[in-house]
Amino acid sequence: MFTQELINENFSLKQVNRKGGRVYVDEDSNEYPSITTVLSILSEAGIKAWRARVGEEEANRVSSRAIKRGNKVHSMIENYIQNKEVDYSDLISTQNFKDIQPIIDDKLTKVYAIEKRMHSKHLGVAGTVDCVGEWDGRRAIIDWKTSAKFKKKEWVHGYFMQACAYSIMWEELTRQPITQLVVCIASDEGPQVFTEHRDNWDQNLISVINDYKTRKRLK
């Protein structure tokens, strides 16, 4: 059983999906681009090349399957860490979840937020954090990912920047600094966990955000 100490603080944010990506709108109608949309510029060239190589039909099939699997595993983890019943009906997603479950049991003790929408006026972006909790004895921003294959750490810099953004949003929301970033990947080749310190990624994050905003202005 995981201790639930969910925070009451809340940003009133509405998600809006547009052609150029997702944005979040606050109660004063201010718009903030989604941090996942912003960071997508890091992989644009690679995804474009992959689509050209495998063809649009195959690319759409693989992407759709990955999104469905990712959503299912996320749902399983969310229910599990809220001490709710977990649906084991999908075999592939269940295997991914079972692989990562012992790590969650060992490291996660308290849960402060799940799927919480937040924004940062300082960064000018918003997003929905997977989990904020106590991991290995320290408060942490925790991001759940799925993958078909193992990933090298140098391949997931975007994940660290995403978690860094959530950390900054969280501090603006609660006035509680969190510097530990945890990325848990449930891959078909086994589980992976990467941990980083927020301060190693804030400058990289700001650089990408500025690049994104420059591109938007030039369109």
Image (cartoon, rainbow, N blue to C red):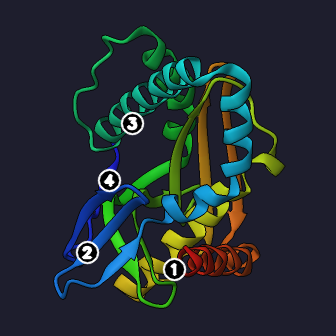
Q: Which residue is mark 3?
A: 77
Helix or strand or loop: what does disc 3 sit on? helix
Q: Label 1 crowding class (10 Å Cα cut-off): few <14, some 14-19, many 20+?
A: many
Q: Is residue 137 left or right of residue 10?
A: right
| Quarter that holds the C terminus | bottom right
Tell me the residue at 25%/74% (across/down): 25
User: Callout 4, which amino acid?
Assistant: Thr
Between disc 4 and disc 3, the foreground one is 3
Q: Which residue is mark 2?
A: 25
- Number of disc labels: 4
Q: Are marks 4 and 3 in contact (CB under 8 Å)?
A: no
Between disc 3 and disc 2, the foreground one is 2
Helix or strand or loop: what does disc 2 sit on? strand
Tag on residue 168?
1
Between disc 1 and disc 4, the foreground one is 1
Q: Position of residue 162 (x, y in %)?
A: 57, 63
Q: Label 3 crowding class (10 Å Cα cut-off): few <14, some 14-19, many 20+?
A: many
Tell me the residue at 48%/13% (across/down): 92
- Corner quadrant of residue 205: bottom right
- Quote the CA–CA distance across marks 1 and 4: 24 Å
User: Callout 2, which amino acid?
Assistant: Val
Q: Which residue is mark 4?
A: 3
Q: Is residue 46 left or right of residue 108?
A: right
